[in-house]
Image: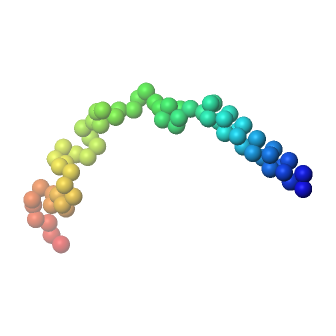
Amino acid sequence: MGMIFAGIVVAVVVAVGAGYFFQTRQEPAWQVFSTESTRVGDPGHNLVGQNWTGEPGNASRGNGDATSS
């Protein structure tokens, strides 16, 4: 019975120690995987097209010309 309690105590101590170790040594993912060449503020001009409005219904309309089926 004593060995069971000793095992539980050792497991708790190892878990608390590992949690403390990883909390102090670990950096956030946004800081580790950040790059200097990412353009967040300026997405550019060629991503969605010059006449893109963001409305979901405009994608199938095109420029107004009739298309043959």
Give the residue at x 15% y 69%.
68
Rendering quarter of residue 4: bottom right
Residue 38 appears left or right of 69: right
Is residue 10 visible in the rendered structure shown here? Answer: yes
Locate residue 32 relative to residue 10 in the image: left or right.
left
Residue 33 is at least partly visible in this image: no
Spot the residue most to the top: 36
Which residue is found at the position 24% from the left and 38% from the top? 45
The answer to which quarter of the image holds residue 50 is top left
Image quarter of the C terminus? bottom left
Percent of width and height locating residue 56? 21, 58
* Residue 53 vs residue 62, the one in the foreground: 53
Residue at 27% across / 36% down in the picture?
Answer: 44
Q: Residue at x 86, y 47 (%)?
A: 6
Q: Is residue 58 above or below residue 30?
A: below
Of the pair 5 and 48, the residue shown nearer to us: 5
Q: Position of residue 5 (x, y in %)?
A: 84, 51
Q: How is the image coloured?
A: rainbow
Q: Is residue 69 left or right of residue 11?
A: left
